[in-house]
Image (cartoon, rainbow, N blue to C red):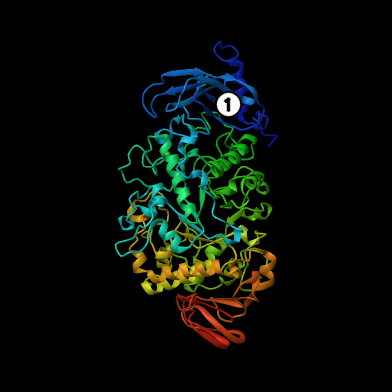
Amino acid sequence: MKSMKTRRAKKLLLMSVLATFSCTSIQQKVYSSFDDYPVYEGQWEEMVYSPAATRFSLWAPTAQEVRVLLYDEGRNGSAYETVVMTAGKDGMWKTDVDGDLKGKFYAFNVKVDDQWLGDTPGVLAKALGVNGDRAAVINMADTNPEGWENDARPALKDFSDIILYEMHHRDFSIDSTANIRHNGKYLALTEEGTVTADGAKTGIDHLKELGVTHVHLLPSFDYSSVDETKPDLPQYNWGYDPKNYNAPEGSYATDPFQPEVRIREFKQMVMALHKAGIRVVMDVVYNHTAVTKGSNFERTVPGYFYRQDEKGGFADASACGNETASERAMVRKYMVQSVCYWAQEYHVDGFRFDLMGIHDIETMNAIRSALNKIDPTIYMYGEGWAAAAPRLPQERLAMKSNTYLMPGVAAFSDEFRDSLRGPFGHDEKGAFIIGAPRHEAGIKFGIVGGIAHPQVNNDSVHRVPKIWANQPTQFIAYASCHDDLCMTDRIRHTLPGASVKELAALQKLTQTAILTSQGVPFLFAGDEVMRDKKGVANSYKSPDEINAIDWTLKTTHRDVFDYVSGLIAMRKAHPAFHMGSADLIRQHLEFIHVPASNVVAFRLKGNPCGDSWLNTTVVLNARTEPVTVDIPDGKYWIAARDGRIDLVMGLGTLVGNKLEVAPRSAMIIHQ
Ligand code: CA
């Protein structure tokens, strides 16, 4: 905002007067608002290596002095050399250090208001020492694994073909039942042929068998909470505590002390997934940093990267102590460049934005357009909300309600989620799947992928959520994710005393709704084998006993796994389930009137998108008794019924105009 004159800016003015009397400092630049800070044009880099010399740069327009400290080690010890940097154009400080610095480490030190702000690896460090306190001088070309030049993104025709699978490195492979050598590490996803003691596939083979198109990795950039120097301690964190945005987290690498290792192993992981036909999504958390005062941003350009509250302190829409200011030119540039860097250097295929509602629309659109130049099939989605009201007008924020203003960007549908299993944070409150009334409209809203549809209407009983997606590919259909209870726990909480059979039936019913939704389906890792988290909803730092997936469950609940993988195979084989266009959905998707509550039935009229199935009909019956649904008279093949799915042989045929669906189950038929 042009008019914003912060307390900080006034303070800077005072300090600059003092600064002119200091013979060791240059005059501190004073800007009346953050909008007046110089914008650096061109590629923003902090370290460019060559064997002859290394160029260090730092964008620090309010600095009086900047120096770079060179170290032999990634931690401990003193700098062996301190090099004074020179102020250049547009706030960029620079220096060239002659000689081959490969293998050295560095930190910057910035003086503002006559105070040195403390060592920082900079804001864009791409290689790090252990725990990310110092950056490293490396030659990025050395980090490429063998065959990297031939790595290619798996084919993706349309966003509507996507099936997302959200996983945490440690949850996924740490348990001994996974039988994975590099358990809990990036390299876990490169190990083929791993099985449980019963012979059930684990690791990357499990993902292939399940059939998902994208793995969504919980934060895998460098975060703060896990001490990388103690690999033998069983430490756990989701990783929503960012420290360095442009380098991989060290605790998932086999050697976090060697800067090249985490980079190479991340690339090996991407390459292995690509080879398996699976794309890779990174969870990016630009909305806040783990620490505020001592963050790399604050140690470089105090105040600039964060929004201020009315008192000049840090605004806090993330509820983590701060919120970043994407609307400021260099923060926007930072985010665009960082996302493009992961897409280009690491071949990442998609980005999930944490608390996207804190960012501004213009920045999200700028990222979309920059990614389009790299590869328009790179997917973008995010949480269209914030933890508290951000300090930017609502109409500028990338909130869910503004999704229609961001073509090619999707948001999570909490409406569909809550209609299926109950609201966030209210663990005991159930919804459609356990038979709670008045959730049918929310289910229909989810089935059409959140687009405006003539049959998704308000009536005296039902309130339809506000439409925010222009296209179904802007709508993430999910029932559970890392946040909150996973599905098995949720069903247990909302249906106390449910038997294993009932848990399995409702898990299948839920996943049928998700995987027949016209939105983009999203699965939480382990729901397909009925993992639980022992009832812990906010398991962000819970130990392995809570978070690790026990892979013997894949054998115990083989029927659930087979059913979910069957649904995925069905969706992939039948474009009618993911038409990808709001107009086609309005044309072909028709709800069938069912007088009973807790039943939603729909028909995909004709064979949309050239589907080999005709008039595919889906019934979701959450009632504890069977339901009969009227269908057009004819002969139908049965693909799914009573918790079983068979695409190859089918489950028999049906002739007539009545479809009887068993309690707590889904039925899928076609002509
Ligand atoms: Ca870290």
Q: Where is residue 257 in the image (x, y as percent from the top left)?
A: 37, 35
Q: In this view, does 309 lie above or below 23?
A: below
Residue sitting at 49 percent across and 43 percent down?
A: 320
Front in this rendered view, residue 543 or 70: 70
The residue under label 1 is 60
Q: In which quarter of the image is the C terminus?
A: bottom right
- Secondary structure found at label 1: loop
Residue 338, quarter of picture: top right
**Dot 1, how many residues are within 10 Å of its Cα: few (below 14), some (14-19), or many (20+)?**
many
Front in this rendered view, residue 213 or 401: 213
Q: In this view, does 652 lie above or below 497?
A: below
Q: Residue furthest bottom?
A: 656
Q: What residue type is labelled 1?
A: Ala
Residue sitting at 66 percent across and 28 percent down?
A: 38
Whether residue 485 is visible, yes or no, is: no
Q: Is mark 1 within 8 Å of ligand 1?
A: no
Q: Where is residue 118 in the image (x, y as percent from the top left)?
A: 47, 25
Q: Where is residue 53 in the image (x, y as percent from the top left)?
A: 51, 22
Front in this rendered view, residue 624 or 89: 89
Q: Where is residue 33 in the image (x, y as percent from the top left)?
A: 66, 30
Residue sitting at 41 percent across and 32 percent down?
A: 129
Q: In which quarter of the image is the N terminus?
A: top right
Q: In this view, does 639 lie above or below 357?
A: below
Quarter of the render that holds ligand 1: top left
Q: How many marks do you count on the picture?
A: 1
Whether residue 366 is visible, yes or no, is: yes
Residue sitting at 67 percent across and 32 percent down?
A: 35
